[in-house]
Amino acid sequence: MIEEMEYLLEGAKSLGLKLTTGQLEEFYVYSQEILCWNQKSNLTAITDPKEIQIKHLLDSLSIYPLIQNIPGLKVIDIGSGAGLPGIPLKIVLPDIEMVLLETNSKKASFLMHITETLEIKRIQVITGRAEEIAHFEEYREKFQVVLSRAVASLPVLVELTLPFATLGGRLIAQKKNSQLEVTRSGPAIRELGGKLLEIRSVELEGLEGHELVIIEKIEHTPEKYPRHTGIPSKRPLGLQRSEGKSGKGLT
């Protein structure tokens, strides 16, 4: 079992992570459950075990160096899908508080199943849309870290995610070759109360071109954001409608 996770084990070392036997077993079970559920829930287009380790698990863990030393950390994963990047990060950082937000009910069912199967504590699965949940008092501006992977173009994404971040908190968006998206998202970032901090390249074999776009929340998000369901993607802040339909990030 552990031998089958060799790509994950070696890649994690490059991130400063020495995975335990228990963690490797959890990752193995998680990978197998993704493949099993994928037949009925369309969780991922990636089904090769090596590719899952690199393009799903290691890609998720690329965030680890940015959040490993933050005490009492509250994290929300927007559009979690198969639990990426939230569940891999929770496996290696069991003390963080994690919320997984997913619109699709079948994918949310998988998230509830896998958190129970792995007996993960301090984790919550919410089925709903970010445009709605971000207006709930218990979630609005309550998270030091907001994560998102393969959800939408950055001008749309900042409207869906920054309302969840507390002042001084950060959005970490996983993207590929993101410079054009970042440039186009400038007006939306400012309007939502954010400031671009860094575009960090992921230096792992098999993840060339992958980047972490890091945005800090420096002002409160105006109460009107996010706008009603579907509006952010149809009319991205600062962009013409046709521009907002491209650049959904990772696949």
Image: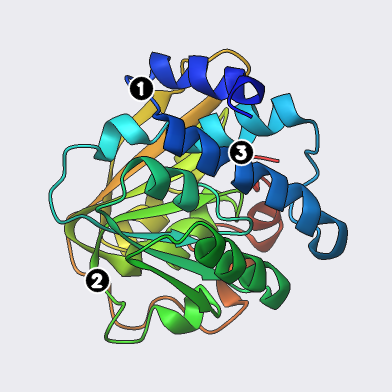
Can see residue 109?
yes
Around disc 3, counting alpha carbons within 10 Å, would you say few (fewer than 14), some (14 to 19), or many (20 or more)?
Answer: some
Q: Disc 3 or 2, which lies upstream in sequence? A: 3
Q: Residue at x 63, y 55 (%)?
A: 82
Q: Amino acid at mark 3?
A: Tyr
Q: Position of residue 49 (x, y in %)?
A: 74, 30
Q: Which mark is residue 141?
A: 2
Q: Which mark is residue 30?
A: none
Can see residue 209?
no
Cβ–Cβ below 8 Å for labels 1 and 3? no
Is residue 27 found left or right of 171 in the rendered image? right
In the picture, which quadrant includes the N terminus?
Answer: top right
**Is residue 134 or residue 61 the one in the foreground?**
61
**Is residue 37 or residue 231 the one in the foreground?**
37
Q: Disc 1 to disc 3, how far (Cα)?
A: 16 Å
Q: Nearer the viewer, mark 3 or mark 2?
A: 3
